Image (cartoon, rainbow, N blue to C red):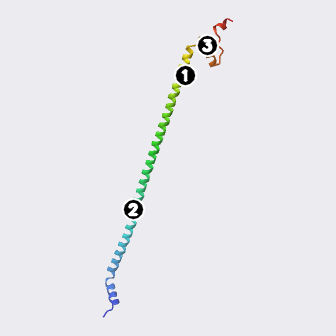
Amino acid sequence: MLTVWQKTKAFVGKYWQLLLGTAAVIFLLVRQAFLLDQHEDVLENEVETNKKLVEIRTEYNAKIEKAETEAAMAHDDAELEIKKKEVQELKAARDAAIAREKDNNSVSGDELADRFGDTFGAEVVGANDENE
C-alpha cells in the first residue's frame, strides 16, 4: 500500500501545474483584497477630511458674516451718533445766531460798528470822529 506521502507526491507530480495556477489565483485574490481594503481606507479618510473641511468652512463663513454684521451695526451706530451731534451743534449755532441777531437789532449802528471792529481787530472810525 502506498503511504500518504507517496499519494501526495504522486498527486502533486500529476497536477503540479493546476496546483501552481490555483495558488497563483489565490495569491492574486488575497493581494487584490488587501489593495481594495487600502483604497477603501483612503477613500473613507478623504470623505471624513472633506466633511471636516466643509464644517470648518461653514463655521468660518458664519463667523465672518457675524463680524461683518456687527461691524456694520457699529458703523451705523457711530454714524447715527455723529448725525445727532451734528444736529445739536447746528441747532445751538442757529440759536446763537438768532440771539446775536436779536441783540444786534437792539443796539445802535455805532455800537454794531464797534462790535464788528472788535471782532476783526480793526479800529472803527465813526462819523463824529472824522470831523475832529
To which residue does mark 2 refer? 44
Query: Who comes first in sequence, dot 3 or dot 1?
Result: 1
Q: In what element is the residue under mark 2?
A: helix
The residue lying toward the viewer, choosing from 105 and 27, is 105
Q: In what element is the residue under mark 1?
A: helix
Residue that appears at 41% across and 59% down: 48
Is residue 62 positioned above or below 74 on the image?
A: below
Q: Which mark is residue 111?
A: 3
Which residue is at the far left? 1
Numbered-mark total: 3
Is residue 61 positioned above or below 84 on the image?
A: below
Residue that appears at 42% across and 54% down: 55
Q: Is residue 84 left or right of residue 12?
A: right
The residue lying toward the viewer, choosing from 56 and 87, is 87
The residue lying toward the viewer, choosing from 89 and 79, is 89
Tell me the distance, in whole angstroms, between the alpha carbons under discs 2 and 3.
95 Å
The residue lying toward the viewer, choosing from 80 and 38, is 80
Amino acid type of the residue tagged 1 in the rendering: Ala
Query: Who comes first in sequence, dot 2 or dot 3?
Result: 2
Q: Nearer the viewer, mark 2 or mark 1?
A: 1
Q: Which mark is residue 96?
A: 1
Q: Quadrant of the C terminus?
A: top right
Q: Quadrant of the N terminus?
A: bottom left
Residue that appears at 51% across and 33% down: 82
Residue that appears at 54% across and 19% down: 99
